[in-house]
Every structure is written in C-alpha cells, then in structure tokens.
Amino acid sequence: MSEKPDDVVILDGAFEPDRRRLDVGGGSLIAFTSRSPDKQTENEDTVAIIPWGPQAVVLIVADGAGGLPAGKKASLAAATSLARSLQLALEKTMLLRTAVLNGIEAANDAVRDLANGSATTLTVMTIEGRLARSYQIGDSEALLVGQRGRIKMQTTVHSPTGFAVEAGFLDQRAALHHAERHLVSNFIGTVDMSIDVGAAVELASRDTIILASDGVTDNIHIEELIEMIRKGSLEDAADAVIGKAMQRMANERRGQPSKPDDLSLIVFRKP
C-alpha cells in the first residue's frame, strides 16, 4: 500500500475518536471518526482530506464493509491509494475530475490487490474554487445544503432502498427504517465497481457540505441533519450531528432509528 503524501490528513480513529479542524481549499472543515460504541474491534471507517493547490481540496469518507474481512485495511488502502494517485496527477497538472476518476480506479485496484476479500464504500467530494462535485460508490453519503435548508446536491445511496428513494417508490424516512437498509450494491474492491459522478454545483456563501458514513445517516433523519448543519458554527454543527447519532445508537426508542455503527463525517463550509 502506498504511503500517503505529507500534506494529506488521514483520520482512522482505530480505537479512539479522532477529530480535526482544518482550513483548506478556500474554506474550513471539521472531520471526525469514531468506532461503534458497541464493539471492541477497530473502527473500519477512514476519513481523508487531500489538498489540491491553494483553492481546492478532495474530501473522502470510506466505510470498510461490515461482515467482510479486514474492512479497515480496505478503507485505509482506498484512501491512501487515492491520495497518492492525486499527488502524482497534480504534478502532471491533470484536470481534477480526471485525476479523481483515475484515482478511484487505482483505489479499487489497491483494495483488490489486498486479496483478502475486503471491500469498502467510498464517497468523494471535490471543492475547486466555488465548484463542488461528488463521486459515489456505496452507501456513505454527501449532501450540500444552503443556509435556508435547501438541498442543492445529494448523492444516491447504492442500495435497494437508496434506488427506491431515487425512483420515488420510498421516502427518506421510510427508507431509514426499512428491513433491507443495510444491503449495499456497489463497493470499492470489486470487479464490477461503478462510479456515480455528480454534476458540478456552484457554492454560495455559507453553503454547507457534509460527507457521512452510515453511522450518521442510519441514525439521523435527513430533515434533522439539514437543520443541524445549515447554520451556526462548524463546531456546533459537527457537535450536533455527532451527539445526536451517538444518542440514537445508545438509546433505542420506538419510532426513532437506532443502529450502532462506526461514525465518520466531514463538515465543510466556504466563508
């Protein structure tokens, strides 16, 4: 597995929570990862922040597939491989969109080369000046909301319930409680991996981006998540999301989601 470039920040939070605040890509972010409160094994999520020059950044949340061997190795291999690939592309002055697509292919090869049956989701968001674009594999999610709460971009979860929501057969709240919510249909580390590339979206002042593993999105309804992140400070937004997700994991209540899991997020905002 390639070593990460020196300016790349990777959080793995293997056994202890890891939290960072960074000014990067012309904005600020809070990144956080922590293992599930109900297990003794390591956190299988990996979070990465990859600078791309002074006004651009690549954000990554990878969730090693639960139930498969070496989920942590898969998510970490994907993140470090993508970071190394992007560094080489920057030296060649390659377009960022091309560099990310090539990097994701390299990440898929890196996880397959582990040859241990592991796999991982991979949600990537690029911020280049005022333009944001998503790249989606699996069931972690990315969301862009305005200060008034309008959804400007939301990735589609690669799962039966995610596609049902996208087609209008199931609403977001019902999907969160669906018996097949845990099924995922697309992974890094597989021969048939596919990349869902989003359209470029222009960021307005105070727009907020969040990338989150399903430790967040399986425990917080979308309208709750929007209300937590759309205003106030980044620190308050991150604290609200982490606190609510942890509370739901620890206290099962009728009518509310409660699924203990590794929890990872990045909250980013332009000034």
Image: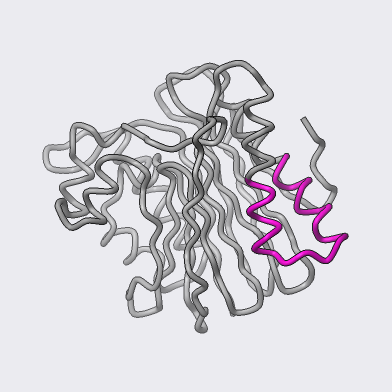
**Side of 167 relative to 249 (left or right):** left
Q: Give the image's coloring scheme.
A: one colour
Q: Which residues are magenta?
A: 81-104
The residue located at (64%, 63%) in the rendering is: 97
Which quadrant: the C terminus? bottom right
Q: Quadrant of residue 11?
A: top right
Residue, far front: 192
**Side of 196 relative to 96 (left or right):** left
Which quadrant: the N terminus? top right
Residue 202's place in the image compared with 23, above or below, is below
The residue located at (48%, 19%) in the rendering is: 68
Residue 194's place in the image compared with 22, above or below, is above
Residue 142 % position (x, y): 45, 57
Give the overall secondary structure of the magenta segment. Answer: helix
**Side of 257 relative to 90 (left or right):** left
Residue 141 % position (x, y): 42, 51
How many marks can you see? 0
Is 223 covered by the magenta stretch? no
Residue, far bottom: 205
Residue 20 % position (x, y): 64, 52
Is 95 covered by the magenta stretch? yes
The residue located at (34%, 71%) in the rendering is: 151
The residue located at (49%, 44%) in the rendering is: 194
Pick the front one: 70 or 24: 70
Residue 83's place in the image compared with 230, above or below, is above
Residue, far right: 91
